[in-house]
Amino acid sequence: MKDYIQIGLKKGYISFNEDRSRITYVYQKKERNYNNPEEKVQAEAFLKLIIDYNYLESRIRQFVPVTMGSDIKEADIVVYDDDMCLSPHIVVECKHQDVSEAEFLQAVNQAYSYAFSLPCDVKYVWVTSGIRNEYYEVDKNQNSRNQIPDIPQYGVDKIASYKYVYGAQYMEHEEREQQFFDLSVIEQSELTRRFKQAHEALWAGGQLNPSEAFDELDKLIFCKIWDERKPRKIGEPYDFQIITVSKQEEKDPDSRRAKENENLLNRIKALYEEGRKKDKEVFRDDIRLSPEKVRTVVGYLESVNLGETDLDSKGRAFETFMGSFFRGNFGQYFTPREIVKFIVDVLPITQDSKVLDTSCGSGGFLLYALNKVREQATEYYPNHNNDVRQHDRWFKHWHDFAEKNLFGIEINEQISRAAKMNMIIHDDGHTNVITLDGLVSDEAIFAKTSNQGFKYGTFDFIITNPPFGSTIRQSEQAYLKTYQLGKKEEDWLAVKAQPENIRDGQSTEVLFIEQDYKFLREGGYLAIVLPDGILTNSSMQYVRTQIEEWFRIVAVVSMPQTAFAANGAGVKSSVLFLKKWKKEETDRLVQTKKNIESKLLKDSDYLAKRTLWDKEIKQKQKEKAEEIKGKQRIPATAAKQTEEFKLWNANLLAEYTAKIDELKTRLKEEYQQSKQQKLQDYPIFMAIAEEIGYDATGKKTATNELDLIGEELKKFIATL
């Protein structure tokens, strides 16, 4: 993208004071406040007229007085057709970059009023906010508006129906012949602003709610990217742009605009269908915008080259825009960037790794994994920008990973669509992101998506932040009974063997531990964010026991209470790093525990004591009933219903319960001691992060202890 300000300074069209707070337009000797946002837009428009459109600096006037009735106003820029600057040719109205749709339309009206108030025949109007431009041909006799794709360059009489073509810089053009433009690479901040303003323009009128508008904008961004990827010859126009209809073809201005909109919508729909044929999972429903709304969005994005915009810039722009919209209602689908980066950085993910997020939300973990492999590709092929063969190898290195090894599941269709779009913006990796309940079986996934990549026992890394706090109920999801953690745990101190007992419900985060275990290959890593209750609550001991049998516990990194506060969650959590045992090791652990339990039961004579105590209870209950029967001369069954018996019996049962609990406690303590002796001891990396780079509101802070913790954990994992 041209740096018009820098070019203007170099050529002497403008100058600045020392702190760049004041700009001077040299030819006119006019000094202005450059801190004014509209002034920055005006300065660029002024320089574009000279640099891109070849107008003479001496024929451009700024801040031109315009008499409108009894008022005198100022037109921002007027380009004249003569050296005396008496015949206005183009009126330019400038607005700041954050102008709303309604304010922009007001600016169009303002520019037209200037055009009609100025003397002679003003031919053209250009309204610009820097990120949005509209151009009009003026006919004072008809008092009508005819939108055109661009203003003419100096000396050009005939304007084509489009502005943007592929390879414009390589086209030869004759004098007095229109010069076309190719798409421009822009900065992250401007791209973010364009996304946001296009989104606001879609819902501001009330036809769509913000959520629906986000979906529709997603679809059009997809079409924009697809249009850029289509093969074109030099000079061939892009489809994703406003292409006008001539007055000769359609005289009525309303009918002309309607036809332009219809043609544009048809081109957009064609792009959409081409893309959907390649990947049906990206967008399942049709574009639902009106032709006029499509035109509005295209107006914001038609000039931008998304394909060549720096990957990090466009990725951050989309994430910033997406985050600002979604965090209010969908905060749970976003894991803070600092935590995502920490988790991905410490894991030894390479281009050969198969990676999954079973509840991928907006795709943060997948994107960081993709970027990690892309950075590795750059290390392997540092000269890829200058060497064609190296570039091909560099591209294949990370793109094969994105296409074949990166997988995500997201239950919310809207968020899933955003994740896919996020991946597409980052140059791919969306192919294996599916919309589905992440807790269904791999067979169910294949049956619904035909994607055979989601197969149990095949993933090298699972990186995920599952939803906390919700409960899966057996009455709602039949798959609960297929989960071991969906069943009540066996009690090795039970006197009688209990039948298999399905829980009424189980929390999602617990089930995701088991689902991730199923998806991992032996030796694969799981990095999962979990609420601390799973690690500390006595009622969750059975979950910790199961984790111990399934995984080697690699690390536990405690997050601060505020880690997810900005996303609407206040649950204290930690990141667990786990490595799946080989089946033989899990079997050995389970058998070792059973052997310890059997020995303790045998050595303590537990079952015999429990049986003896049960007999003693029954004998004492019988004797007490006989005693009351004799005193009150009532049947034994009636004696057991008396208040005297009930009070006595409650005390008796409490006495024996205390004895049983005492025995159980002793055996459990002996079990833990024996387990520590019998099971292999291994080191576990433990850390507490109190400062993680942002505060409870999400605002950045100076200290991020995860950087240091991550470096140490990476070294620790390398030794395993």
Image (spheres, rainbow, N blue to C red):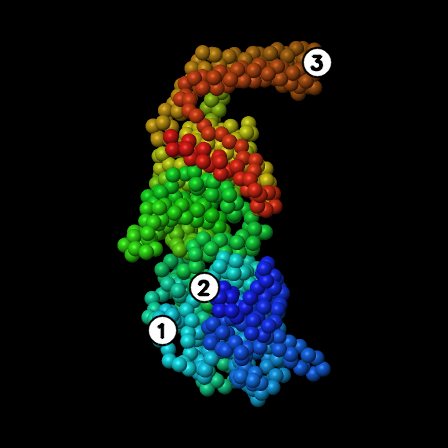
Query: Looking at the image, can residue 701 be seen?
Result: yes
Q: Quadrant of the N terminus?
A: bottom left
Q: Which mark is residue 171?
A: 1
Amino acid type, label 3: Gln
Tell me which residue sits at (36%, 73%) in the image: 171
Asked where in the image residue 234 lies, by quadrant, the reply is: bottom left
- Label 1 and label 2: CA atoms lie apart by 18 Å
Question: Residue 118 shows which numbered tag?
Answer: none
Q: Secondary structure at mark 3?
A: helix
Q: Position of residue 659 (x, y in %)?
A: 57, 14
Report x, y in % for residue 407: 39, 47
Q: In which quadrant is the C terminus drawn?
A: top left
What mark, if any, has residue 1 been given in the picture? 2
Quadrant in the picture for residue 597: top left
Left or right of residue 301, residue 107 in this image: right
The amino acid type, in three-letter code, at marker 2 is Met
The answer for how far apart the CA atoms under marks 3 and 1 are is 116 Å
Label whose residue precedes the other's in the sequence (2 or 3) = 2
Mark 2 and mark 1 in contact (Cβ < 8 Å)? no
The residues tagged by marks 2 and 3 sit, at their Cα atoms, a distance apart of 104 Å
Dot placed on the residue nearer the N-terminal end, 3 or 1: 1
Q: In the image, what residue type sits under mark 1?
A: Met
Give SS at disc 2.
loop
Near mark 1 (Cα within 10 A), the count class, few <14, some 14-19 or many ≥20, is: few
* Mark 3 lies on residue: 632
Q: Earlier in the sequence, mark 1 or mark 2?
A: 2
Q: Nearer the viewer, residue 319 or 527?
A: 319
Q: Please report the residue visible at 44 percent of the width from the left and 33 percent of the height from the top.
A: 713
Quick check: 403 above or below 547?
A: below
Q: Residues within 10 Å of mark 3 (few under 14, many from 20)?
A: few
Residue 406 at x, y = what percent?
38, 47
Q: Which residue lies most toward the bottom here?
A: 141
